[in-house]
Image (tube, grey):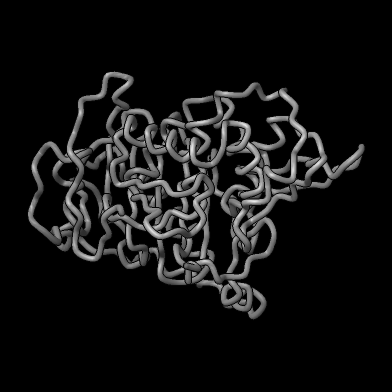
Protein backbone atom coordinates (compact mmCIF):
# COMPACT_ATOMS: atom_id res chain seq x y z
CA UNK A 1 0.00 0.00 0.00
CA UNK A 2 1.41 3.44 -0.87
CA UNK A 3 2.51 5.44 2.12
CA UNK A 4 0.48 8.69 2.31
CA UNK A 5 3.40 10.34 4.11
CA UNK A 6 5.62 10.15 1.03
CA UNK A 7 3.72 12.64 -1.09
CA UNK A 8 5.82 15.73 -0.33
CA UNK A 9 7.80 17.34 -3.13
CA UNK A 10 11.44 18.19 -2.38
CA UNK A 11 14.18 20.10 -4.14
CA UNK A 12 17.40 18.13 -4.66
CA UNK A 13 19.73 18.57 -1.72
CA UNK A 14 17.28 20.46 0.49
CA UNK A 15 14.35 18.65 2.07
CA UNK A 16 11.63 21.24 1.61
CA UNK A 17 7.99 20.44 1.03
CA UNK A 18 5.92 22.34 -1.50
CA UNK A 19 4.30 24.28 1.32
CA UNK A 20 7.60 25.40 2.84
CA UNK A 21 9.07 26.25 -0.55
CA UNK A 22 6.17 28.61 -1.15
CA UNK A 23 6.72 30.16 2.25
CA UNK A 24 10.36 30.64 1.39
CA UNK A 25 9.42 32.37 -1.84
CA UNK A 26 7.07 34.66 0.05
CA UNK A 27 9.65 35.29 2.75
CA UNK A 28 7.42 33.85 5.45
CA UNK A 29 10.14 32.53 7.73
CA UNK A 30 9.71 32.61 11.47
CA UNK A 31 10.47 35.91 13.13
CA UNK A 32 12.75 35.85 16.15
CA UNK A 33 10.92 36.31 19.44
CA UNK A 34 12.24 38.55 22.23
CA UNK A 35 14.87 36.90 24.40
CA UNK A 36 13.09 38.16 27.52
CA UNK A 37 10.26 35.68 26.95
CA UNK A 38 11.05 33.24 29.72
CA UNK A 39 9.17 31.30 32.35
CA UNK A 40 10.41 30.90 35.93
CA UNK A 41 11.52 27.49 37.11
CA UNK A 42 8.46 27.28 39.32
CA UNK A 43 6.43 26.80 36.15
CA UNK A 44 8.45 23.76 35.14
CA UNK A 45 6.07 21.18 36.62
CA UNK A 46 6.31 17.63 35.26
CA UNK A 47 3.44 16.52 33.05
CA UNK A 48 3.28 13.03 34.54
CA UNK A 49 4.44 10.99 37.48
CA UNK A 50 8.00 9.72 37.60
CA UNK A 51 8.87 6.40 36.02
CA UNK A 52 11.25 3.98 37.75
CA UNK A 53 14.77 5.23 38.43
CA UNK A 54 16.08 2.65 35.99
CA UNK A 55 14.62 4.62 33.08
CA UNK A 56 17.31 5.53 30.58
CA UNK A 57 19.07 8.71 31.61
CA UNK A 58 17.23 8.94 34.93
CA UNK A 59 13.66 9.20 36.17
CA UNK A 60 13.38 12.94 35.52
CA UNK A 61 13.85 12.39 31.80
CA UNK A 62 11.04 9.85 31.74
CA UNK A 63 8.57 12.58 32.67
CA UNK A 64 6.85 14.70 30.09
CA UNK A 65 7.18 18.47 30.12
CA UNK A 66 10.02 20.76 31.13
CA UNK A 67 12.81 19.38 33.30
CA UNK A 68 15.38 21.88 34.61
CA UNK A 69 16.75 22.66 38.04
CA UNK A 70 18.94 25.23 39.74
CA UNK A 71 19.63 27.63 36.88
CA UNK A 72 18.17 30.76 35.36
CA UNK A 73 14.94 30.28 33.47
CA UNK A 74 15.01 28.53 30.13
CA UNK A 75 13.53 30.78 27.38
CA UNK A 76 10.41 28.65 27.25
CA UNK A 77 8.22 31.05 25.28
CA UNK A 78 10.73 30.92 22.43
CA UNK A 79 10.46 27.15 22.27
CA UNK A 80 7.64 25.70 20.19
CA UNK A 81 9.33 22.32 19.63
CA UNK A 82 7.52 19.16 20.67
CA UNK A 83 10.75 17.90 22.25
CA UNK A 84 14.24 19.24 22.99
CA UNK A 85 17.28 18.51 25.14
CA UNK A 86 20.46 20.30 26.27
CA UNK A 87 23.45 18.24 27.41
CA UNK A 88 27.11 18.67 28.26
CA UNK A 89 29.02 16.86 25.55
CA UNK A 90 31.94 15.99 27.82
CA UNK A 91 30.25 14.84 31.01
CA UNK A 92 27.02 13.63 29.44
CA UNK A 93 24.98 15.55 32.00
CA UNK A 94 21.54 16.59 30.75
CA UNK A 95 21.07 20.20 31.81
CA UNK A 96 17.48 20.67 30.67
CA UNK A 97 14.91 18.86 28.58
CA UNK A 98 11.36 18.89 27.32
CA UNK A 99 9.77 15.53 26.48
CA UNK A 100 13.23 13.97 26.20
CA UNK A 101 11.93 10.49 25.38
CA UNK A 102 8.93 11.40 23.23
CA UNK A 103 9.05 9.24 20.11
CA UNK A 104 8.87 11.35 16.97
CA UNK A 105 9.81 11.05 13.31
CA UNK A 106 13.53 11.95 13.08
CA UNK A 107 13.91 12.81 9.37
CA UNK A 108 17.56 13.04 8.29
CA UNK A 109 18.93 13.36 11.81
CA UNK A 110 18.73 9.54 11.75
CA UNK A 111 21.71 9.69 9.39
CA UNK A 112 23.84 10.27 12.50
CA UNK A 113 23.05 6.69 13.55
CA UNK A 114 23.73 5.49 10.00
CA UNK A 115 27.14 7.15 10.09
CA UNK A 116 27.95 5.88 13.57
CA UNK A 117 27.12 2.37 12.35
CA UNK A 118 28.84 2.30 8.94
CA UNK A 119 31.54 4.99 8.95
CA UNK A 120 34.38 2.86 10.30
CA UNK A 121 33.81 0.03 7.82
CA UNK A 122 35.41 1.70 4.81
CA UNK A 123 38.64 3.64 4.39
CA UNK A 124 37.91 7.18 3.28
CA UNK A 125 40.26 6.79 0.28
CA UNK A 126 38.52 3.65 -1.01
CA UNK A 127 36.97 4.09 -4.46
CA UNK A 128 33.64 2.73 -5.63
CA UNK A 129 31.91 2.86 -9.01
CA UNK A 130 28.17 3.28 -8.55
CA UNK A 131 25.78 0.84 -10.20
CA UNK A 132 22.19 1.52 -11.21
CA UNK A 133 21.02 -0.95 -8.57
CA UNK A 134 22.73 1.06 -5.82
CA UNK A 135 20.41 4.02 -6.32
CA UNK A 136 17.31 2.44 -7.85
CA UNK A 137 15.70 2.06 -4.42
CA UNK A 138 16.10 5.68 -3.33
CA UNK A 139 12.58 6.89 -2.41
CA UNK A 140 10.95 9.36 -4.78
CA UNK A 141 11.08 12.87 -3.36
CA UNK A 142 14.32 12.25 -1.47
CA UNK A 143 16.99 14.83 -0.83
CA UNK A 144 19.83 14.12 -3.27
CA UNK A 145 23.45 15.12 -3.63
CA UNK A 146 23.57 14.02 -7.28
CA UNK A 147 25.16 10.56 -7.28
CA UNK A 148 25.17 9.03 -10.78
CA UNK A 149 25.61 5.45 -11.91
CA UNK A 150 28.90 4.84 -13.69
CA UNK A 151 30.81 7.53 -11.79
CA UNK A 152 33.57 6.50 -9.40
CA UNK A 153 33.55 8.16 -5.98
CA UNK A 154 35.78 7.95 -2.96
CA UNK A 155 34.18 6.94 0.31
CA UNK A 156 35.04 10.40 1.61
CA UNK A 157 33.04 12.01 -1.20
CA UNK A 158 30.05 9.80 -0.49
CA UNK A 159 30.14 10.77 3.20
CA UNK A 160 30.35 14.42 2.20
CA UNK A 161 27.18 13.83 0.20
CA UNK A 162 25.53 12.36 3.29
CA UNK A 163 26.56 15.05 5.77
CA UNK A 164 26.57 18.18 3.63
CA UNK A 165 23.57 17.62 1.34
CA UNK A 166 21.73 14.94 3.32
CA UNK A 167 21.85 12.89 0.13
CA UNK A 168 19.73 9.76 0.30
CA UNK A 169 21.43 8.63 -2.90
CA UNK A 170 24.81 8.68 -1.12
CA UNK A 171 23.28 6.86 1.86
CA UNK A 172 21.93 4.09 -0.35
CA UNK A 173 25.26 3.62 -2.15
CA UNK A 174 27.07 3.24 1.17
CA UNK A 175 24.34 0.93 2.45
CA UNK A 176 24.71 -1.31 -0.60
CA UNK A 177 28.48 -1.28 -0.14
CA UNK A 178 27.74 -2.47 3.39
CA UNK A 179 25.74 -5.46 2.17
CA UNK A 180 22.35 -3.96 1.40
CA UNK A 181 19.54 -1.91 2.91
CA UNK A 182 18.11 -4.68 5.10
CA UNK A 183 21.51 -5.58 6.55
CA UNK A 184 22.30 -1.94 7.24
CA UNK A 185 18.94 -1.31 8.91
CA UNK A 186 19.46 -4.35 11.13
CA UNK A 187 22.94 -3.15 12.07
CA UNK A 188 21.63 0.34 12.82
CA UNK A 189 18.95 -1.10 15.10
CA UNK A 190 21.57 -3.21 16.87
CA UNK A 191 23.77 -0.15 17.22
CA UNK A 192 20.88 1.81 18.71
CA UNK A 193 20.37 -0.99 21.22
CA UNK A 194 24.04 -0.91 22.17
CA UNK A 195 23.92 2.87 22.59
CA UNK A 196 20.79 2.34 24.73
CA UNK A 197 18.79 4.48 22.34
CA UNK A 198 15.66 2.48 23.02
CA UNK A 199 13.21 5.08 21.72
CA UNK A 200 14.57 4.51 18.22
CA UNK A 201 13.03 2.20 15.63
CA UNK A 202 14.86 2.08 12.29
CA UNK A 203 12.98 1.35 9.07
CA UNK A 204 15.35 2.87 6.50
CA UNK A 205 18.96 4.10 6.75
CA UNK A 206 18.22 7.57 5.40
CA UNK A 207 15.55 8.79 7.84
CA UNK A 208 12.91 9.13 5.13
CA UNK A 209 9.27 9.00 6.22
CA UNK A 210 8.14 5.42 6.84
CA UNK A 211 5.51 4.17 9.29
CA UNK A 212 7.18 3.30 12.59
CA UNK A 213 10.45 5.12 11.89
CA UNK A 214 10.90 6.97 15.19
CA UNK A 215 13.47 8.38 17.56
CA UNK A 216 13.63 10.95 20.38
CA UNK A 217 15.56 14.03 21.42
CA UNK A 218 17.42 11.88 23.93
CA UNK A 219 18.42 9.24 21.39
CA UNK A 220 19.48 11.72 18.73
CA UNK A 221 21.71 13.41 21.28
CA UNK A 222 23.25 10.03 22.11
CA UNK A 223 23.99 9.48 18.41
CA UNK A 224 25.59 12.89 18.08
CA UNK A 225 27.74 12.55 21.18
CA UNK A 226 29.05 9.14 20.23
CA UNK A 227 29.55 10.10 16.60
CA UNK A 228 31.51 13.24 17.43
CA UNK A 229 34.10 11.11 19.23
CA UNK A 230 35.13 9.84 15.78
CA UNK A 231 37.43 12.32 13.96
CA UNK A 232 35.97 11.53 10.53
CA UNK A 233 32.37 11.96 11.72
CA UNK A 234 33.34 15.24 13.38
CA UNK A 235 35.16 16.42 10.28
CA UNK A 236 32.35 15.62 7.87
CA UNK A 237 29.58 17.24 9.92
CA UNK A 238 31.64 20.42 10.31
CA UNK A 239 32.51 20.77 6.62
CA UNK A 240 30.85 23.77 5.03
CA UNK A 241 31.73 23.34 1.34
CA UNK A 242 33.14 20.51 -0.79
CA UNK A 243 33.59 19.64 -4.45
CA UNK A 244 31.57 16.66 -5.65
CA UNK A 245 32.28 14.56 -8.76
CA UNK A 246 30.16 15.23 -11.82
CA UNK A 247 31.84 12.72 -14.16
CA UNK A 248 35.21 12.80 -15.84
CA UNK A 249 37.29 15.56 -14.32
CA UNK A 250 34.28 17.77 -13.68
CA UNK A 251 33.02 18.63 -10.20
CA UNK A 252 30.34 20.82 -8.69
CA UNK A 253 30.30 22.55 -5.34
CA UNK A 254 28.06 21.39 -2.53
CA UNK A 255 27.28 23.37 0.62
CA UNK A 256 26.20 22.08 4.00
CA UNK A 257 22.46 22.47 4.63
CA UNK A 258 23.09 23.23 8.34
CA UNK A 259 22.11 26.90 8.42
CA UNK A 260 23.83 27.63 11.75
CA UNK A 261 27.07 26.38 10.21
CA UNK A 262 26.82 28.28 6.92
CA UNK A 263 24.64 31.27 7.77
CA UNK A 264 22.17 30.53 4.99
CA UNK A 265 18.53 31.63 4.72
CA UNK A 266 19.03 34.83 6.68
CA UNK A 267 20.55 33.19 9.75
CA UNK A 268 23.86 34.11 11.31
CA UNK A 269 26.47 31.44 11.84
CA UNK A 270 26.60 30.27 15.44
CA UNK A 271 29.91 31.00 17.13
CA UNK A 272 31.70 27.78 18.00
CA UNK A 273 29.34 25.44 16.13
CA UNK A 274 30.94 22.12 15.18
CA UNK A 275 27.94 20.29 13.59
CA UNK A 276 25.97 17.99 13.71
CA UNK A 277 22.92 17.14 11.50
CA UNK A 278 19.66 18.67 10.37
CA UNK A 279 16.58 17.06 8.87
CA UNK A 280 13.25 17.87 7.28
CA UNK A 281 10.31 15.98 5.86
CA UNK A 282 6.67 17.03 5.54
CA UNK A 283 5.76 14.46 8.21
CA UNK A 284 8.62 15.04 10.65
CA UNK A 285 8.83 18.77 10.16
CA UNK A 286 12.23 20.19 11.05
CA UNK A 287 14.65 18.36 13.31
CA UNK A 288 18.19 19.29 14.31
CA UNK A 289 20.98 18.24 16.59
CA UNK A 290 23.70 20.84 17.00
CA UNK A 291 26.95 20.94 18.94
CA UNK A 292 29.07 23.95 19.82
CA UNK A 293 32.26 24.53 21.81
CA UNK A 294 33.08 27.70 23.73
CA UNK A 295 35.81 28.24 26.32
CA UNK A 296 36.62 24.55 26.29
CA UNK A 297 33.06 23.41 26.92
CA UNK A 298 30.97 21.51 24.37
CA UNK A 299 27.18 21.51 24.50
CA UNK A 300 24.77 19.34 22.55
CA UNK A 301 21.24 20.46 21.71
CA UNK A 302 18.50 18.54 19.93
CA UNK A 303 15.27 20.22 18.80
CA UNK A 304 12.41 18.27 17.20
CA UNK A 305 9.29 19.46 15.43
CA UNK A 306 9.03 23.20 16.19
CA UNK A 307 5.64 24.61 15.33
CA UNK A 308 6.65 27.55 13.15
CA UNK A 309 8.84 28.27 10.16
CA UNK A 310 11.81 26.54 8.52
CA UNK A 311 14.31 28.63 10.50
CA UNK A 312 12.69 27.96 13.87
CA UNK A 313 14.61 24.75 14.52
CA UNK A 314 17.88 26.69 14.20
CA UNK A 315 16.70 29.71 16.16
CA UNK A 316 15.52 27.51 19.00
CA UNK A 317 18.75 25.49 18.95
CA UNK A 318 20.75 28.72 19.15
CA UNK A 319 18.60 29.96 22.04
CA UNK A 320 19.18 26.73 23.97
CA UNK A 321 22.91 26.80 23.27
CA UNK A 322 23.01 30.41 24.49
CA UNK A 323 21.19 29.38 27.66
CA UNK A 324 23.54 26.46 28.19
CA UNK A 325 26.70 28.51 27.80
CA UNK A 326 25.34 31.32 29.98
CA UNK A 327 23.54 29.40 32.71
CA UNK A 328 24.42 25.73 32.26
CA UNK A 329 27.19 25.67 34.85
CA UNK A 330 24.70 26.54 37.58
CA UNK A 331 22.13 24.00 36.43
CA UNK A 332 21.84 20.81 38.43
CA UNK A 333 21.69 17.85 36.04
CA UNK A 334 18.24 16.39 35.47
CA UNK A 335 19.62 13.26 33.86
CA UNK A 336 22.53 11.84 31.92
CA UNK A 337 23.45 10.49 28.51
CA UNK A 338 24.19 6.85 29.22
CA UNK A 339 27.25 4.95 28.01
CA UNK A 340 26.98 2.25 25.34
CA UNK A 341 26.68 -1.27 26.68
CA UNK A 342 29.79 -2.23 24.70
CA UNK A 343 31.75 0.44 26.57
CA UNK A 344 30.70 -0.64 30.04
CA UNK A 345 27.40 1.19 30.31
CA UNK A 346 24.91 -0.18 32.83
CA UNK A 347 21.77 -1.56 31.22
CA UNK A 348 18.70 0.62 31.77
CA UNK A 349 15.00 0.32 31.02
CA UNK A 350 13.15 2.20 28.29
CA UNK A 351 11.03 5.13 29.38
CA UNK A 352 7.26 4.63 29.11
CA UNK A 353 5.50 6.43 26.29
CA UNK A 354 4.08 9.72 27.51
CA UNK A 355 0.93 11.52 26.57
CA UNK A 356 1.11 12.64 22.97
CA UNK A 357 4.07 10.40 22.23
CA UNK A 358 4.33 7.32 20.09
CA UNK A 359 5.73 3.92 20.83
CA UNK A 360 7.94 2.15 18.31
CA UNK A 361 6.14 -0.21 15.99
| Residue 44 position (above or below residue 112) | below
Judge from the rendering whether residue 237 lies leftward or rightward of residue 51; answer left or right. right
Where residue 143 sits, quadrant-wise, is bottom right
Judge from the rendering whether residue 235 lies leftward or rightward of residue 339; answer left or right. right
Where residue 52 sits, quadrant-wise, is top left
Quarter placement of the C terminus = bottom left
Query: Which one is nearer the viewer's eye here, 253 or 318?
Result: 253
As drawn, the residue found furthest toward the bottom would be 26
As drawn, the residue found furthest toward the front would be 1
| Residue ID at (45%, 58%) | 210
| Residue ID at (33%, 29%) | 194
Residue 360, position in %: x, y? Answer: 30, 52
| Residue 336 position (above or below residue 261) | above
As drawn, the residue found furthest toward the right would be 249
Number of numbered markers: 0
Residue 238, position in %: x, y? Answer: 60, 38
Residue 337, position in %: x, y? Answer: 29, 35
| Residue 318 position (above or below residue 291) | below
Residue 53, position in %: x, y? Answer: 10, 39
| Residue ID at (40%, 57%) | 105
Amino acid sequence: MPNPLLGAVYRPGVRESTRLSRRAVLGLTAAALPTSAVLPLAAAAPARAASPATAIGGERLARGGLQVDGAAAVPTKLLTARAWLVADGTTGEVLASFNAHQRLAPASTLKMLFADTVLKKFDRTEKYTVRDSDISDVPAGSSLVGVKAGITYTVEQLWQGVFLRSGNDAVHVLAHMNGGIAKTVAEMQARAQDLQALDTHVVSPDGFDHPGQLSSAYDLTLFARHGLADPDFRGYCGTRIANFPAGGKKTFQIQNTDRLLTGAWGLKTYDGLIGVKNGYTSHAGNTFTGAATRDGRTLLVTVMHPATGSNAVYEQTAALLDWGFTHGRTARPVGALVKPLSEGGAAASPAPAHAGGQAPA
